[in-house]
Amino acid sequence: MDDMDRAIVNEIQSDFPIISRPYHEVGKRVNLSESEVFERVKRLKTDGVIRRIGGNFDSRRLDFRSTLCAAKVPEGDVEDFVRVVNAYPGVTHNYQRNHDYNVWFTFIAPSMSHIEEALEEISRATGVTEIVNLPAVKRFKIKVDFEV
């Protein structure tokens, strides 16, 4: 990444313009043409620097439920477990930790019962029996930007 790539990422990570020509607007902000911004973003996405471009929604305002889950997965089974978990469209994050509960993921669904059913399905499909559902008791929402 060069300085211009960093400037573009800093511009779009929390303030992506929701207009008919968003790359034109970003270009005005960083002094590049629309096509230059688009090509750079496309390359950054292909290279895995940008994982996703999309909206973030408040699941509660959409009448959905969300939870954090933790699982004790045998080291040799992590890849298969993660593949099964990631097949669920409500899984938004999935990461490995250095802990007895070594795989953590967030899950959003229309109801908590839907999440609980999915966790049972995941357990049956993977043989992992220790999956903990940790719904939030109190919500703390902070904006996180990473200066690149």
Image (spheres, helix red, strand yellow):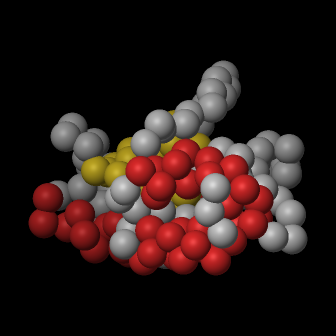
Q: Residue at x 28, y 50 (%)?
A: 96
Q: Which residue is pictured at 84% across the width and 49% down the height?
A: 63
- Say which quadrant the N terminus sits in: bottom left
Residue 47 x/y as whole percent: 37, 72
Q: Residue at x 24, y 56 (%)?
A: 73
- The foreground one among 55 and 40 is 40
Residue 69 x %, y %: 46, 46
Q: Residue at x 86, y 44 (%)?
A: 61
From this view, report whether residue 148 is shown above or below residue 116. Answer: above
Looking at the rendering, which quadrant does residue 54 occupy?
bottom right
Q: Residue furthest left?
A: 76
Q: Is residue 64 left or right of residue 116?
A: right
Say whether residue 70 is left or right of residue 40.
Answer: left
Of residues 20 and 98, which is closer to you in this image? 20
Q: Is residue 110 visible?
A: no
**Count of marks placed on residues:** 0
Q: Position of residue 144 (x, y in %)?
A: 56, 34
Front one among 58 and 78 = 58
